[in-house]
Amino acid sequence: MADQDIENAVTRALSESPDRNFRETVDLAVNLRDIDLDDPSNRIDESIVLPSGTGQETTIVVFADGETALRAEDVADDVLDGDDLEDLGDDEDAAKDLAEETDFFVAEAALMQDIGRYLGTILGPRGKMPEPLQPDDDVVEVVERMKNTVQVRSGDRRTFHTRVGAEDMNAEEIADNVDVILRRLHADLEKGPLNLDTVYVKTTMGPAVEVA
């Protein structure tokens, strides 16, 4: 359960957000301090499963053949096989469009080498190389887990954002998501909470509320 201060901040962010004619996301903005982000080893790059889900549709594409591909069709937005992969390697524009439209990729481990060859230059810089699917992994379970996953990435910037929910989720659910992300950041950062300068929560168009 999240700290009451987090829940209070989320409640304020939701209540102070003006009405819009679309469903807003709720985002977390993190500002770091006292950390050298020119050193890649200090940068944040985490896939974090949110306990209450993202509140949004997450687009997932699976690269697979055979039985795994058949099972993936029930849960993934698209399933591509080895031939599709080769076609994408010959069509850079299509590969870039796929990368931009897809939140996460999953791929059978046997296809990872070909993915690196055909799509590495497209997916790598975007931080979207697929999660390898091992022979014993259940593709349905992996995809369902990734639907509740967000990518938290700082790059070389001290300020970064990530999705923590949607405006029609309750404050407690969103606060639990925020709590999980902050705990992961505390564990990852060299000085833990001391490397966090300020943290804000806000809806898409609403005011930022500082998380105490």
Image: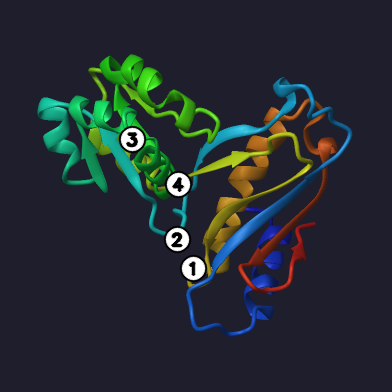
Q: Residues within 10 Å of mark 3 (few under 14, many from 20)?
A: few
Q: Tag 3, which secondary structure? A: loop
Please provide percent x and percent y for residue 92.
Answer: 39, 35
Q: Is residue 146 left or right of residue 152?
A: left
Scheme of image coloration: rainbow
Which residue appears at 46% of the width and 32% of the height? Answer: 122
Query: Closer to the camera, 144 or 91?
Result: 91
Foreground label between 3 and 2: 3
3D distance between C-alphas at marks 1 and 4: 26 Å
Looking at the image, tell me whether mark 3 or mark 1 is earlier in sequence order: 3
3D distance between C-alphas at marks 4 and 3: 15 Å
Foreground label between 1 and 4: 4
Q: Residues within 10 Å of mark 1 (few under 14, many from 20)?
A: some
Q: Is residue 141 above or below residue 50?
A: above
Which label was assigned to residue 91? 3
3D distance between C-alphas at marks 3 and 2: 33 Å
Query: Closer to the camera, 23 or 187?
Result: 23
Residue 43 picture quarter: top right
Residue placed under numbered mark 4 in the picture? 100
Looking at the rendered structure, the kind of residue marked 1 is: Met
- Asked if the residues shown at circle 2 and circle 1 are in contact, with their CB atoms under 8 angstroms apart, the answer is yes
3D distance between C-alphas at marks 3 and 1: 40 Å
